[in-house]
Image: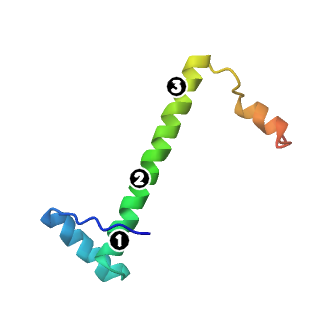
Amino acid sequence: MTKHAPIQLPEEAHRMLDRVVEIAGGTPASHVQKAIEQYLEDLEDIRAAEEALEEYHRTGGAGTITLDELSRRLGLDD
């Protein structure tokens, strides 16, 4: 299911969107939808990374290994 969310863009952003549509095809709505979806996914990734960093600091890095150790465990230490 999709929801309708009208937006207003500054003129320069609208001109940029028009250029993207002219070059790549599609519709303005499809490009805005893709951009918003990517932005929201990026925010989720940032949140997850911040949580992992907080956990790392909270535990003093317990459970982490060096790249050399990872390579050894995976049999990549040629």
- What is the C-alpha distance between the residues marked 1 and 2? 14 Å
Residue 56 lies, in percent from the top left, at: 58, 24
- What is the C-alpha distance between the residues marked 2 and 3? 21 Å
Asked where in the image residue 4 lies, by quadrant, the reply is: bottom left
First in residue order: circle 1 vs circle 3: 1
User: At 76% across and 35% down in the image, what residue appears?
Assistant: 70
As helix, strand or loop, the secondary structure at mark 1 comes to: helix
Q: What's the residue type where badge 2 is placed? A: Leu
* In the image: residue 52, left or right of residue 69: left
Q: Which residue is mark 1?
A: 31
Residue 21 lies, in percent from the top left, at: 31, 79
Near mark 1 (Cα within 10 A), the count class, few <14, some 14-19 or many ≥20, is some
Q: What's the residue type where badge 3 is placed? A: Glu
Picture disc at residue 56: none
As helix, strand or loop, the secondary structure at mark 2 comes to: helix
Near mark 3 (Cα within 10 A), the count class, few <14, some 14-19 or many ≥20, is few
Picture disc at residue 54: 3
Residue 66 lies, in percent from the top left, at: 71, 29
Asked where in the image residue 16 lies, by quadrant, the reply is: bottom left
* In the image: residue 39, left or right of residue 68: left
Residue 65 lies, in percent from the top left, at: 72, 28
Q: Which residue is mark 2?
A: 40
Q: What's the residue type where badge 1 is placed? A: His
Mark 1 and mark 3 residues within 8 Å of each other at the beta carbon: no
Mark 2 and mark 3 residues within 8 Å of each other at the beta carbon: no
Q: How many marks?
A: 3
- What is the C-alpha distance between the residues marked 1 and 3? 35 Å
